[in-house]
Image (cartoon, rainbow, N blue to C red):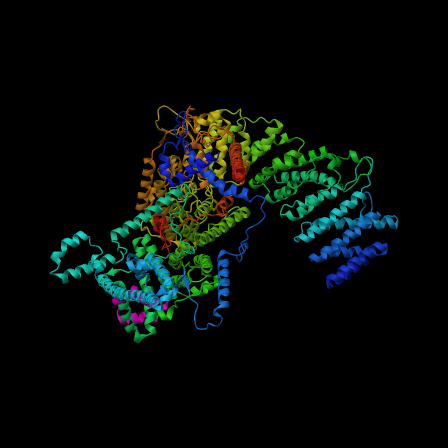
Amino acid sequence: MGKVAKKRSLADKVRKTKTSSEIKNNPFEVKINRKKFEVLGRKTKHDVGLPGVSRSKANTKRKETLLKEYKQKNKCSKFIDRRFGEYDTNMAPEDKILQRFAMERQRGHDKKDMFNLNEEEELTHYGQSLAEIEKFNDLANSDDESEEKGLLSAELTASHFGGGGGLLRRKASGDQHEDEGGHRAKSRQELIEELIQKSKQEKRQRQVQREEAQELTEKLDQDWKSIQALMVKKTPRAEQADEPEEKPKLDKYDMMVRELGFEMKAQPSERMKTPEELAREAREKLQTLEADRLRRMMGQEVGDSVQRQSHLSADDLNDGFILDKDDQKTLAYEDGKWNIGEETGEDGDEDAEEGESGEEDESEAEEQDEDGDEEAEEEGEEEGGSSEEEEEDGHSDLDSEQESEDEGRQQQEDEETSAEVEKSLSKEEVKAQQEAAKAELPYTFTAPEKYSDLKDLLYGHTPDNQRLIVARTQKCNHPSLAVGNKLKLQKMFGFLLEYIGELATRSPPELTAINKLIPELYALCQMFPDVACKALQSLLGDAAHGLEEVLEVKGHVAFPALDMLIYLKVTALLFPTSDFRHPATTPALLYISQALTKCPVRSLKDITTGLVLCCLAVEYVSFSKRFLPELINFLAGTLHLAVQDKTSLGYAVVPPFRTSGRNGDLLVLSDAESCKNWSKKELPLSATHHLELQTDLDRDQHRLMCLSTCLDLVKRCCLLYKDLMSFPQIFQPIRTLLSKYLQVQTLPEPLQELHSTILEVISAAPVTNTPLVFEKKKPIPLKLLTPKIVEVLDYGKKRGSTKDEREKERLNHKYKKEFKGALREIRKDSRFLAREKLNEVMNRDSERKRKVKELFGSLATQEGEWKALKRRKNRR
Amino acid sequence: MAPAKKRNVSSAKTTGQSVKTAKLDLDSKVERILESRKHANDVFDILEVLESEKEKDVNTAVSACSKLFCTLLERKDLFIGKLPGEEEAVSGGSGPGEKYSIFMRHRYNSCVEMLLDHLSHEAHSVKESALCCLMKFAAGEGLHPLEDLDWSEHYSFPRELIQTVVDRLLSKTTDNTLVLSRFQEFLEMEDVRFYAMSSIRDSAGKVMDKNQGAVMPIYQNNVFTLISNISMPSQESELTNFMVKQEAKHEDWKAAKLNEHKRVFERMWLGFLKYRLPSSMYKKVLVILHDSILPHMSKPTLMIDFLTAAYEVGGAISLLALNGLFVLIHQHNLDYPDFYKKLYNLLEPSIFHVKYKARFFHLANIFLSSSHLPVYLVAAFAKRLARLALTAPPAALLIVLPFIYNLIRRHPSCRVLIHKPSTEDEPLEDPYLMDEEDPAQCCALESSLWEVKTLQKHYHPDVAKAAMLINKPLSEQEEDISEVLELTVFELMERDLKQTQTKTIPLEFETASQLLQGGGNVLGQHFCLN
C-alpha cells in the first residue's frame, strides 16, 4: 500500500505541475461516458470526466479537513487568538483595526517617546514614511524606480547582493587580521562612505535632471494645449496632406481653424424651428388629440390619455406647472453672437435708461408686458385656438411666476417681451396708458376665500378688467408659488362658476362679462380638471334633482333659466362632448334631454329657451353624430306650433307638446303681412331670461326668427342623422308636417328655401335597409390533434399532475439525489480514514521492525564481538 | 222661559268680556247644571256661546257641550222615545223629571243641529272639535239609545246621527279633506265604518241623482277622499273594534260580519262609480282600483263594466284600466275579446312620457309573458315598441330595450327580427305598417329592428350599450326589467355623477375663448350675447 500511496502522491505532484489543458488533452486522464443514443436538445454535463483530477482534489480536500480533524482527535489543547476584540462580534472590523492600532501606538509610545516633545511621529504607508513619499511626484517616483531598477552597476549589485558577501568576506578577512591595526578597518568604512556619497550625488544629479525635464514637458504641454484645438477634429492623414501647403498662409488658416474648432466645441443648441415645422407639430399634436377623442367617442378605454404629459419627473408636483426647455436659456448663437452677451448688453442699456425714471418705468414695463401678453393671446385666438397658443399661455404663466419670484429678472424679461410694443407706441401714449392703468388695477391680488370676496373683487369693473383681475389672481397664486395656492385656485373655480351664474341671472344678464371670463375658466379647468368636473357635476346634479322634485310636486316644470343654459354651454366648452361616457358632459346631455321632454311650452320665451337648448344639444352631438330623440321631438313640436290648421293631423306629436290645446298656436303668425319686412337676425340670449314684445309685429318677427332657427336646426339634424338606419322613420313626422301642414307660402323667402332643402335632404336619404344579421362570429375551430406542448422541467418524471404534486416530486427527487451523494461521501471519508489509519499502523510497524532489526543487529554485533573476544581469548 | 232669556242676555255680556273667564264660566256652568236641575236654564248660555263668531269661544263651548250632554246621556236624563213638542211638554201634565228630560232632550237636539252646522264652518279647528263632539254623542247614543225600540228586533246604533254627519261632511261646495281625514279615524271602528259606508252610498245616490249625473268635482272629490281611504279588514277575526257593543246577538249583527261589510263596500263603490267622473278622478280611482277596491269586493266581476268602459277611453286611462282588467282576467276568469289588439293600439309615443309607464310596462310584461301567444303578435309588439323607442327619453329606452329583448327571448321564432340571414343581400324598405291597427296585418315579421340598430348611436352610453346587444345572439337568460321600471332621469344621471373616478378626466383640447364658440358654432349662429 505504501507503494501505491507513493505512486499516487507522485501522480498528484505531476498533475499539479501540469496545466489543466494538458490534463484535458491527455487521453489517459480523460474518461468518456459513452452515450447509448443522442437526445436532441439535452445538455449533458457528465459526458467527459477527469477521474484522476477529481480524485486528487477530493484527496487533498480530505487531507486538509478530515485528516486534520482526525489528528486533532482526543487532543484538548487549543489555539486561542488573543488579539483585541477577536471574538467580539459586535464590533465592526474597522473599529477592531482602529482599536488595535491605537493600542499598538500606545504601547510604543509609553516606552520611548515619553519625553519626546517636538518630534512628531512618523506616518507610514506600507512601512514607508509618508513624508518621503509626498516629496516625490508619483510620476517622478515611478521614473525613479524604473531607473534605479534598470541600473545594475557591478558596484551596486555588489553592495546589495554580492556586496554583502564581499563585505562579509572582507570582514572575515578583517577579523582574521584584526590585530594588524585600524587601517584596514578605516578603509572599509571609508569605502562605505564613499559609496554612499557617490550614490547620493548621483541621486541629486538625477533629480535635477528630472526637474528640468519636467519643466520642459510642462512647457511643452502648455504649448500643445494652445494648439490642441487645431488638431482635435483633424484626421491625421488630412493634416499630413495639408501641412506643406498651409504653412505660407498661416494666419488665414489659423483663423479658420480656430473658428472651426470653436464650432466643433460648441454644444449643439436646439435648432430654431421653421414656421412650417411649427405648424406641422401643432397639427400632429392636434391629430393625436383628435385620435384620442375618437377613441373615447367609441367608448374604448384609453390606457393613458395623451393629454397627460408623457413624462412625469419625480419632482413634478402635478400642478400643471411645466418646466419647459424653452424656458431655460441655452447657450446659443444668435446672429453670430452669444445670446448671453446680447442679453446682458440689453440689460445694461435698460438699466441706463431706467436709472432716471425709476419706479415709474417699472410699472410701465409691467403694464406693457400685460399688453404684450394680451396681444399675443388675442392673436392666438384669431388663429382659431391652436395648441400653440396653449403653449404660449403656459409660457406667459411661467414668465409671470418668475416675475413674482425675482423682480429684477422680471423687469428684464418684461422689457424683452414688450420691446416691440414699446417701439410702436409713442411716449405720450405710453404715459397716458400708464396712468390709466395705475388708476385702475393693482397687479397682485389675493385669492378669494369666499364667494363674496370674489364678488367684491370684481365689483364695478368692466368685463375686460374683470378678466384681467381673474387672470392676475390666477397668476399671483399659481400652485407652484406657495403651498396653499392650489386649494385657493380650486376654490376660485367654483366661485367663478357661481359668479357666472349670478351674472346670467341679473337683469339684464351681463353676458359680455361671462364671455370675457370664459378663457380664465378654461385655463383653471385645464389646471384642475377634477375640481372643475366636480363643480359642474354638482351644479348639473342639483339642477336635475330640482327639476325632478318640482315635477313630482307640480307635474310640470318651467324651462331652465339662463344661468343653467350658460352652465351647459360652459360644460361643452370645458369638456369634450363627443366622449362615449364623460362624467360631466353625459349628465349635461341628460339634463338637456330632461328639460326638452318635461318642460311644457307656454310662451314665446319658452320656445326661445327650448331652441337654445336645441342648439346646445346639436352642438353636443355635432361631432359624435349621436342620436338625440328628444331633440327631434322638440323641433317637431315647435314646428307643430306653427301649423295653423290643427285638425286631422297625419303625424303624432310627443309630449311636452299636445296636438291641440292652450298655447297651441304660439308660432302661428298673427298677420301674414309681417313677414314682408322680415330679415334674419340673431336672437339675443337674454330673450330666454326676459322677453318683452309689445306689438303684434314684434311678436311676429320673433316668431319668424324662432321658426327660422328651428328650421335651420332641423336641417342640421337631417344632415347629422343622414346615415342612421331609421332616418326616414325618425323624420317622418317632420316630413309630413312640413310638406302637408305648414303653410310655406306665407313665410318669407329664406324660410321657404330652408323648408325645401330640408324636404330634399329627407327625401334624398335611402329608404331601404338590409335585414339585420348578427355579427359574424369567429368560427369555432375544429379540435385538432396537434400535440399539446407542455414545458417539461424534469425528464422521466410523472407529468400532468398538479403544480404542488410536481413540486413535491421534484423535491423528493432532489432529496434522494442528495442522500445518495451524502452516503457516497461518507463512505469515501471512512475509506480515507481507514487508509490513513492503516498507513499509521504500517508506519508504526515498520518503525518497530527497523528498531528491532537495529537492536538485533547491535546485539548480533555485540554477540559477535563477544564471541570474537572469546575466540581470541581461547586462542590465546 | 222669560227668566232664561234674561239670563241669556247677561251671560252674553259676561262672555263678551273675556275668553278666559268665559271658559271658566262655561265649565262652572256645566258643573252647576249637572249639580242640580235648578240651573238647567244655564244651558241656553252655553248654546249661545256655541253660536258665537269667535273660534275660541266656539271651541270651548263645544267641549262644554260634549261634557254636559255626554254626562246627561249617561245619567239617562235625556228623554227617551218619541219626543213630544216642547210647548206640549210644558203644558202637558207630566212629572217635573220628565219635563226636565224633555227640555234637555230639546236642548240636546238643538245642540246637535248647531254642531252639524259647524261641520261646514270655515275654521278647521271648529270643524274638527264639532266632529269629535258629534262622534262622542254618537257613542253615547249607541250605549244609551234615545229611541225606545224593541231591543230584540233592532240593534242600537245612532244610524241617523251618522247619516247626517256623513251628509254634512260630504260637502258640495268646500273641500273637506282635512276633516275627512279626521273622520277616517272614527272609521277604524267597524260599526261606524259599516253604517258610514251605507250612508255614503245613500248620500252619493241622492246628490248625484239630484244633479242628473253631471260632474260635481268638489263633492266627488270629497267622496273619493273619504272612501278611498277606508281600510277594509281582510278577515272576520279582525272585526273587533266596535263603538257600540250589542249586548245581545252581537254575532248576528250585520256590522259584525265581514261579508256584509264587503257587500256594503261594494255597493258604495258601485254607487259612486255609477256616475260620470272627472278624468282626474277617473285616473285616481283606476290607480287604487286593483289594490284597495277589488280585493274587498264580494263580487269583483261587477267592476267589469266600469273597467271595460275605462279601457275603451284610450290614453292614460286605458293604461290604468289595464291593471284592474288584469286582476279580473287573472283571478276571475274574465274573457276579454281583442284584448291584445287593444293593448297593441295603446302603444303610442306618449306611453314613454306618462307617469304610469312603469306600471304599464310591468303589466305589459306580464301579459306578453305567455308562451302561447302567436308569433306575429309578439313581433308586432316588438316592432312597434322599437319604432316608438325612436321618440323615447333615455330612462324609458332602458326599459323598452330589455323588454323587446325579453320578447324575442321568450319567442325564439321572433329572432328573425334581429337576425334574418338571406341569400340575396338586397336592401328593402321597411315593410312594417305603423298605422295598421291590427297586429296581424302589420307585417312586423317581415321587418327587422333597424330602430334598435339606430339606437346604437344614441347619446346616452347605457342606452347605446343596451342597443349593442342585438349585434350578437341574445343570451338565454331573460333580463329583469323590474329594476329599471322606476328609474328616473336623475338616478340615471347619478350613475355618472357618483362614479368614483380614478382615471383622469378628459378635457377639451380646443381652447375656449368665447362663450358662443365651439361645437359647430350652432348657438353662435342663431343667438347673440346682448
For the residue pair A368 and A729, the one nearer the viewer reads as A368
For the residue pair A63 and B140, the one nearer the viewer reads as A63
Give the residues in magenta.
Answer: A406-435
Residue B304 image point, x, y percent: 60, 30
Residue B357 visible (yes or no):
no
State which quadrant residue A371 falls in: bottom left
For the residue pair B85 and B122, the one nearer the viewer reads as B122
**In magenta stretch: residue A80:** no
Residue placed at 42% from the left, 23% from the top? Answer: A785
Residue A426 image point, x, y percent: 26, 69
Main SS, magenta residues:
helix
Residue B410 position (above or below residue A707): above
User: Relative to B115, is A475 on the left or the right?
Assistant: left
Residue A190 position (above or below residue B221): below
Which residue in the rendered view is the most extreme toward the front?
A876
Residue placed at 37% from the left, 59% from the top? Answer: A516
User: Relative to B175, is B401 on the left or the right?
Assistant: left
Residue B180 image point, x, y percent: 66, 46
Residue A218 position (above or below residue B305): below
**In magenta stretch: residue A421:** yes
Which residue in the rendered view is the most extreme toward the bottom?
A356
Residue A424 image point, x, y percent: 25, 66
For the residue pair A535 and A836, the one nearer the viewer reads as A836
State which quadrant residue A378 falls in: bottom left
Label tally? 0
Residue A445 visible (yes or no):
yes
